[in-house]
Amino acid sequence: MRVVLAEDLFLLRDGMIRLLEAYGFEIAAAVGDGPALVSALVGERPDVAVVDVRMPPTFTDEGLRAVLEARRVVPGLPVLVLSQYVEQLYAGELLADGAGAIGYLLKDRVFDSDSFVDAVKRVAAGGTVMDPEVISKLLARGARKEPLGALTDREREVLSLMAEGRSNAAIAERLVITERAIAKHTSNIFMKLGLPESGDDNRRVLAVLAYLKA
């Protein structure tokens, strides 16, 4: 089974090479930065890639972005991501295509070589391996977005115009409906977003913030 390995720390990269080779894997390429990773994934078309999230030059999310770029060229390319934290945005995007063959494990929760190698094999076979904390973070992110999914198309339209700073009168004029209808829509928006009346909070501002974060 051919593996492309991406890890910027030499000692850790060398250690994973030795570990994987000991279990019978062939290392097709071992790289230390995002551009080299994209080139290796597209050029080698490995059976699986093992990728660190943080890589040069910014040490933020280069590994994940390189994987997303490579999977656009090679759809369904099996990738096991290793990270010290959960990068929710790109992790969600990585799972969004539904193609499977994805793993996301937190480094400090990989307890032994057998479980790590098993995860590599499962991803290579087209499976999905997710750390429980990753799942928890992604579900929490989805839950924050869920109220917007309850809005009707008209309510979303009203909320988008609210986000532009328009008053109820201006929204009514734009949509060619009455201000009374707009007031009803905004009331429904506040209710669905869980924004009860309060003397301390501006519900209109909070609704717009929820819209912009989604």
Image (tube, helix red, strand yellow):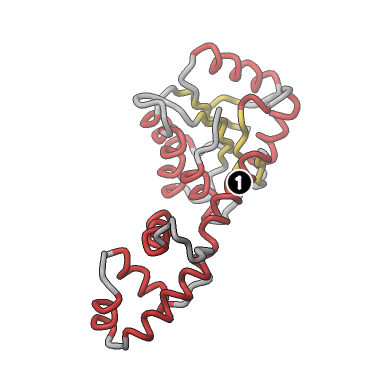
Outermost residue on the top side: it is 11
Note whether 108 is above or below 153 in the view shown: above
The percent coordinates of residue 62 (x first, y second) are 41, 33
| Residue 173 position by quadrant | bottom left
Count of marks overlaid on the render: 1
Seen at 34% across and 68% down, the residue is 160
Near-viewer residue (146 or 199): 199
Q: Residue furthest front?
A: 199
The residue that mark 1 highlights is: 101
Residue 88 left/right relative to 131: left
Kindly state the secondary structure of the residue where label 1 is placed: loop
What residue do we see at 73% from left, 22% from top?
112
Which of the 4 image quadrants contains residue 135?
Answer: top right
Residue nearer the viewer, 43 or 214: 214
Q: Is residue 179 left or right of residue 129?
A: left
Q: Residue at x 67, y 42 (%)?
A: 129
Eyeballing the image, is 151 above or below 41? Answer: below
